Image (tube, grey):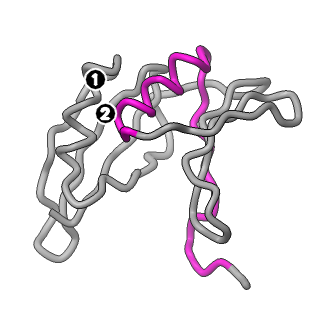
């Protein structure tokens, strides 16, 4: 079976791996399975076959940045739920929940505990 989505995998770099895992576990209210693979520490968002997924990664070449590509993470039914946990988990909300349109839903932008700029998206 071939993936039909424009995104197949993502890696969110971390300098303090445990802090980053704690941050994303708190924001998304879930445990992230951790492994060490090819010289890097990784915490997985999902392990569903053929699903779009990714990891928090710490290792050579993993450098957090607030510039460059902006990755939109699934905010669930209402992105205010995970967004409300960002600051308590050690991040910063840069742009609060903002309506794009009725068809495209809403988004918000935040800086994670490592200094990465990311976004959340939800339909409502």
Quadrant containing the C terminus in the rendered view: bottom left
On screen, residue 8 above or below 111: below
Q: CA distance from mark 2 to mark 1?
A: 6 Å
- How many numbered callouts? 2
Quadrant containing the N terminus in the rendered view: bottom right
Part of the protein shown in magenta? 3-29
On screen, residue 63 above or below 79: above
Q: Is the residue under label 1 in contact with that under label 2 (CB below 8 Å)?
A: yes
Residue 28 pos. (x, y %): 37, 41
Residue 5 pos. (x, y %): 56, 75
* Residue plotted at (51% across, 23% down): 20
The answer to whether 51 appears left or right of 80 in the picture is right
Q: Residue furthest right?
A: 38
Residue 46 is tagged as none
* Residue plotted at (13% across, 69% down): 101
User: Magenta span has 26?
Assistant: yes
Q: Which residue is mark 1?
A: 92
User: Judging from the image, what secondary structure is the residue with disc 2 in?
Assistant: strand
For residue 48, what is the image quadrant?
Answer: bottom right
For residue 7, what is the image quadrant?
Answer: bottom right
Q: Which residue is mark 2?
A: 110
């Amino acid at each position: 079976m071939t993936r039909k989505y424009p995104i197949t995998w993502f890696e969110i770099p971390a300098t303090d791996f445990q802090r980053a895992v704690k941050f994303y576990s708190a924001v998304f209210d879930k445990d992230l399975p951790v492994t060490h693979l090819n010289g890097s520490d990784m915490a997985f968002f999902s392990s569903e076959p053929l699903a779009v997924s990714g990891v928090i990664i710490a290792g050579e070449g993993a450098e957090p940045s607030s510039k460059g590509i902006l990755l939109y993470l699934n905010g669930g039914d209402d992105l205010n739920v995970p967004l409300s946990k960002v600051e308590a988990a050690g991040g910063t909300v840069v742009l609060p929940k903002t309506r794009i349109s009725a068809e495209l839903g809403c988004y918000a932008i935040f800086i994670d505990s490592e200094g990465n700029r990311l976004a959340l998206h939800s339909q409502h």
